[in-house]
Image (spheres, rainbow, N blue to C red):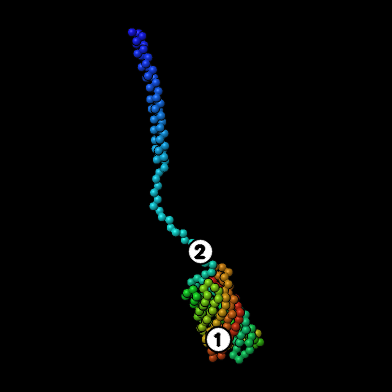
């Protein structure tokens, strides 16, 4: 009986031992396989949030700054040297002319404003000249370029100053009449809205005293 019991127990123990190992290994492999596949999937899902963008990108717009501009208003000062006939029936003498102008732009090629201009000449007996207050139109035939034409029309005052007994210049005669002016020149840009112009002008004064006029070549500084 003891021998039979031993024989009976031994096969069962051996088979159980042989069968347990594969089951344990299979279980371990299955767990590792399941764990290895599940863990990365779960990690990636939680670590990578889904972002939905609804913004739309606008097209790029290139902005450039103009280098030469004539603004809606302008102001300028100028002076020139030339010659003129400042007394009716008199001779021609050297002339000095100065001007101040202000105005506004009507379009890219036309501006309108006012100008005050004085032209003075000297003679052996004294100094004579005229001062014009005129409405002035400026024309720029080529957009963005400096070529310009000026036309003015208005009132004028012609005067004559002669030395008195003490040698000081005093007003001897002042008369009023019509004034006119014409200019042709070219403006050179020194900055975006500032230029230096080289202009040829002819200006005159007319009334009962006759016609007095002067011509000059001068420089004009303008701010637009």
Q: Quadrant of residue 223?
A: bottom right
- Which element is circle 2 on? loop
Residue projecting furthest to the left: 1
Give coordinates of residue 185: x percent, y percent. 57, 77
User: Height in image: 109 above or below 17?
Assistant: below
For label 2, count other residues whose C-alpha is less than 10 Å away and answer few (under 14), some (14-19) or many (20+): few
User: Height in image: 89 above or below 154?
Assistant: below
- How far apart, in angstroms, are the residues tagged by discs 1 and 2? 47 Å
User: Height in image: 46 above or below 193?
Assistant: above
Quadrant of image for the N terminus: top left
> What residue did someone put label 2 on?
64
**What is the count of numbered marks?**
2
For label 1, count other residues whose C-alpha is less than 10 Å away and answer few (under 14), some (14-19) or many (20+): many
Q: Who is closer to the viewer here, 161 or 95?
A: 95
Q: Who is closer to the viewer here, 186 or 215?
A: 186
Q: Could you tell which of marks 1 and 2 lies nearer the N-terminus?
A: 2
Q: Quadrant of residue 128?
A: bottom right
Q: Residue at coordinates 55% horizontally, 70% vertically from top-left?
A: 194
Q: Who is closer to the viewer here, 1 or 44?
A: 1
User: Height in image: 190 above or below 122?
Assistant: above
Q: Residue at coordinates 58% horizontally, 81% vertically from top-left?
A: 201
Q: Residue at coordinates 47% horizontally, 75% vertically from top-left?
A: 106
Q: Who is closer to the viewer here, 32 or 159?
A: 32
Residue 74 visible to the viewer: no
Residue 216 visible to the viewer: yes
> What residue did someone put label 1 on?
205
């Amino acid at each position: 009986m003891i021998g039979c019991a031993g024989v009976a127990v031994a096969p069962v123990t051996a088979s159980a031992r042989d069968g347990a190992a594969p089951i344990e290994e299979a279980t371990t492999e299955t767990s590792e396989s399941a764990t290895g596949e599940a863990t990365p999937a779960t990690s990636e899902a939680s670590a990578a949030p889904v972002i939905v963008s609804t913004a739309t990108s606008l097209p790029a717009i290139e902005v450039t700054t103009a280098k030469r501009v004539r603004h809606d208003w302008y102001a300028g000062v100028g002076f020139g040297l030339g010659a003129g006939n400042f007394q009716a029936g008199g001779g021609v003498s050297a002339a000095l002319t100065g001007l101040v102008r202000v105005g506004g732009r009507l379009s890219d090629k036309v501006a309108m404003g006012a100008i005050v201009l004085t032209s003075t000449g000297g003679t052996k007996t004294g100094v004579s000249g005229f001062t014009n207050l005129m409405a002035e139109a400026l024309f720029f035939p080529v957009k963005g370029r400096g070529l310009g034409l000026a036309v003015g029309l208005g009132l004028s005052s012609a005067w004559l100053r002669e030395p008195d007994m003490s040698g000081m210049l005093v007003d001897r005669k002042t008369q009023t009449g019509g004034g006119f002016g014409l200019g042709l020149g070219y403006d050179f840009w020194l900055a975006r809205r500032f230029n230096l112009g080289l202009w040829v002008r002819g200006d005159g004064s007319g009334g009962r005293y006759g016609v007095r006029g002067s011509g000059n070549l001068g420089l004009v500084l303008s701010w637009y």
